[in-house]
Image: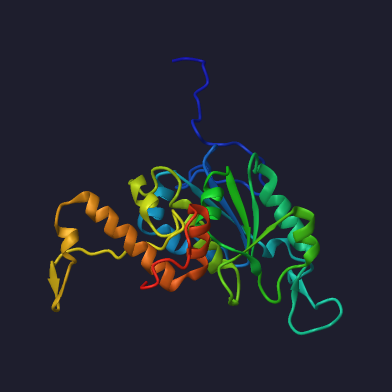
Amino acid sequence: MTDTPKSHGRKSISATLKPRELMTHAPKLAGIWTAKVITLFPEAFPGVLGESLTGKALKDGLWQLETVDLRPFGEGKHRNVDDTPAGGGAGMVMRADVLGRAITHAQRDAHGNWPLIYLSPRGRPLTQAMAQQFSQADGITLLCGRFEGVDQRVIDHFGFQEVSLGDFVLTGGEIAAQALIDATVRLIPRVLGNHASTEEESFSDGLLEHPQYTRPAVWDGRAIPDILQSGHHAKITAWRRAMAERLTKERRPDLWRAYCARHGRDPDEDQEL
């Protein structure tokens, strides 16, 4: 028997608005990369993030997920979170005061390098380089919009980065948030288990990934390219690079031009491609 207090390991201690269960299957861990998601639909998480390698990494404590339900911060008896647009127009806009309270609550224990991200079709397109940057932060907070969007004053006041999945509109930011988290979490050390796989995949060097093949050697009359079964690693590497360049030039001329600019190459070379 000793009077020396026992260490609580990685469990963190912080104030909360409601009592925390004494026993939990997902205790909050200190110093772990964390995704905080502010949403009207917290039940949508973890969703697909709870499956496969990201789900295993979540259970193993390699990263953690926190959802902040926006509704309790709403106004009035019905906890309203939106109102009509200033100046008129269709739809509803999420209120600055409601969002402000929720964001302040979410950020109470967010320390260090902690980007705030608003999922929006008008934001910068999500890239592999951006996901790599997010993975090296201490955590991220994502705001999932709904309706016609959020009050601009919130974005300006808190310094949100606006990030887009592409030139299309979703009904809300939850699907986009899961995609961004997935792209980021898989870059955290030990999540995939094979670091080389992240170095060889699409966009890692500015190129689309080369074609992949596996058994059987012949399927429906289609055979695996002979070079991949030759055992000549240098030739295989050269073939994969050539195919990655071919696919990038054919399908993503924008990426091809950027790649050539970085490597001092003429983007119009190899006209036969």
Q: Position of residue 191 (x, y in %)?
A: 39, 47
In the displayed structure image, the side of residue 3 where residue 84 appears, left or right = right
The residue depicted at 45 percent of the width and 49 percent of the height is: 187
Residue 234 in the image: state x and y as whole percent: 24, 49
| Quadrant of image for the C terminus | bottom left
Q: Across the whole image, how many numbered discs are drawn on residues?
A: 0
Residue at 54% across, 37% down: 31
- The answer, for residue 17, to whether it is visible in the render is no
Q: Is residue 52 above or below residue 217?
A: above
Q: Nearer the viewer, residue 38 or 180?
A: 180
Q: Position of residue 80 (x, y in %)?
A: 75, 71
Q: Left or right? Give the position of 214 relative to 48.
A: left
Q: Is residue 169 left or right of residue 240?
A: right
At 71% from the left and 76% from the top, the residue drawn is: 148
Q: Single out the residue that lies furthest toward the right.
A: 87
Between residue 271 and residue 225, name the one nearer to us. 271
Seen in the picture, residue 183 relative to 120 is either above or below; the reply is above
| Quadrant in the rendering for residue 243 | bottom left
Residue furthest out toward the bottom? 90
Colouring convention used in this rendered image of the protein: rainbow
Res. 199 visible in picture = yes
* Residue sitting nearer the eye, 7 or 211: 211
Q: Position of residue 44 (x, y in %)?
A: 52, 66
Figure quadrant of the N terminus:
top left
Kindly indicate the quadrant of the structure image that contains residue 225. bottom left
